[in-house]
Image: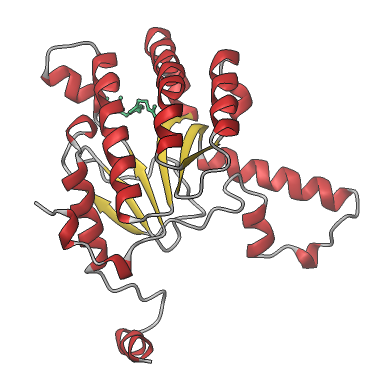
Amino acid sequence: MASISDIDKNKLPNHVAIIMDGNGRWAQQHNKERIFGHQNGVSSVREVTEAAAEIGINYLTLYAFSTENWNRPKAEVDALMGLLVSTIHSEVETLNKNKIRLWAIGNLKSLPANCYNELMDAIQQTSKNTRLTLVLALSYSAKWEIIDAVKKISEKAKKNEISTKEIDEKMFASSLCTNGIPDPELLIRTSGEQRISNFLLWQIAYSELYFTEKLWPDFHKEDFFEAICDFQNRERRFGKTSEQIKVNNKQ
Ligand code: FPP
């Protein structure tokens, strides 16, 4: 199991994104209702956020609620929204103490009013922090985000504010809700599932993918450090050859 001393501080990913999966199965293993898994998942959120800040990661994005999650039983959706409200409310002080800025991406207007207001309050109260930006993906799906960007760009084109020629990767990326946030270099998914589930499809074009069997409530600091070490042992070629990368690294 990895520890903080195994990490090379000069080779850190700037942005790590996580698909927190397996809360339901964890609860089932403990003969409890699904919400018990989500409640225990909050401890992992705390631990991993602390670990990311400790080693000097700048951005941590957590997939907390997808567009598709609205289709879960109403009781689970309500319980998750309640958990989000209470967690955000109770964590603001700790976020400020640790200089962590809260941010959120997704169709935020679709959240219940109390959740939206709590979130906006916390974002505002932590806005001056500069150590780590913790991004919560809420009511988020990548396909929704991409369609939303296409709508924004076509509206501008219709009003002749931009020409088709001006549409390039940079402009498209700036129309996504991650505008201003660098792409994640590392994407972690817990629970043994090996899929992306409509998360950051544009932004992970060149991310390293890391899958672990651990269920989210069992994912602790050491597991996070292990994922970082694994990332640090990979060769990122971005379409180039291994030889080109080695020459560049020497220069
Ligand atoms: C996936 O497990 C997890 C979620 C859909 C919710 C994640 C939410 C939390 C960890 C709690 C609140 C978070 C914050 C940021 C305060 P699953 O239910 O799909 O698990 P399963 O695949 O085993 O059923």
Up the image or down, 200 lies above or below 248; here it is: above
- The residue at 16%/39% (across/down) is 214
Q: Could you tell me residue 82's position as x and y percent?
A: 43, 13
- Of residues 192 and 42, the one nearer the viewer is 42
For residue 226, what is the image quadrant?
bottom left
For the C terminus, the quadrant is bottom left
Q: Could you tell me residue 152's position as x and y percent?
A: 74, 45
- The residue at 21%/61% (across/down) is 230
Q: How is the image coloured?
A: secondary structure
- The residue at 11%/17% (across/down) is 30
- The residue at 40%/82% (across/down) is 240
- Residue that sits furthest to the front in the current view: 97
Q: Could you tell me residue 62's position as x and y percent?
A: 40, 39
Ligand 1 is found in which quarter of the picture?
A: top left
- Of residues 237 and 229, the one nearer the viewer is 229
Up the image or down, 68 lies above or below 228; here it is: above
- Residue that sits furthest to the top in the current view: 75
Up the image or down, 220 lies above or below 68; here it is: below
Q: Could you tell me residue 243's position as x and y percent?
A: 31, 89
Count of marks overlaid on the render: 0
- Residue that sits furthest to the left in the current view: 1
- Of residues 114 and 196, the one nearer the viewer is 114
Is residue 86 rendered to the left or right of residue 211? Answer: right
For residue 244, what is the image quadrant?
bottom left
Is residue 137 rendered to the left or right of residue 197? Answer: right
- Of residues 160 and 170, the one nearer the viewer is 170
